[in-house]
Amino acid sequence: MQKIIYTIQELDEISKEILDNATSKTLCFYGEMGSGKTTLIKAMVRSLGGGDQAKSPTFGIVNEYLLRDGDLLGYHFDFYRLESKQEAMDLGLEDYFNQDAWIFMEWPEKITGLLPSNCVNISIEVIDPVTRKIEIVSTK
């Protein structure tokens, strides 16, 4: 397990560190509403070459991100509004997991049992308005 305390000003540096050390391209983000899950994912998408296209997919459940050359970068899921695991299956979740792409998931606890075995779990805790503590645990 890795623990990191960071401020908003260090976000780009922290996102690169997490990506560089990730044991999987499937990242699960845990934390209360407003803890910075989407903000961290936006920084990661920028770090990976996706520009500033990242935004929360709360209402659409999933966003697709492309690299500047049009190649697939990955998918960003927000399961907050999911009513059942069946809804995730109806999205074709398994097909997304089988692609060679980055997968960023907010509120993965809503689909426990459907998650692949090789995830990186990132828990975010609010320390103060600009400081966060994250704990990173690889399941592989």
Image (cartoon, grey):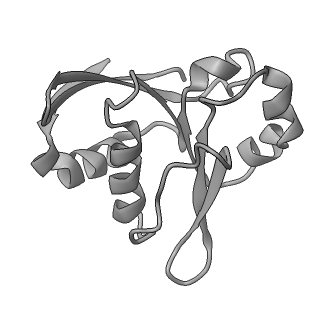
Question: How many marks do you count on the picture?
Answer: 0
**Depth check: 18 or 40 in front?**
40
In the displayed structure, would residue 52 be above or below residue 91?
below
101 and 106: which one is in front? Answer: 106
Residue 8: give x, y in percent of width and height: 16, 45
- Residue 59, image x, y percentages: 64, 45
Quarter where residue 81 is shown: top right
Q: Residue at x 32, y 37 (%)?
A: 36
Q: Which residue lies at the image location 60% right of the left edge and 80% below the top edge?
A: 70
Q: Could you say which quadrant of the image residue 30 lies in? A: top left
Residue at position x 75%, y 47% from top? 96
Taking the image as shown, residue 102 lies to the left or right of residue 81, namely left
Q: Identify the image quadrant of the N terminus.
A: top left
Q: Position of residue 109 (x, y in %)?
A: 59, 18
- 137 vs 15, left or right, is right
> As drawn, is 69 to the left or to the right of 95?
left
Quarter in which the C terminus is drawn: top right
Is residue 135 positioned above or below 27 on the image?
A: above
The spot of residue 57 in percent (x, y) is 58, 49
Q: Residue furthest bottom?
A: 69
Looking at the image, is 5 positioned above or below residue 66? above
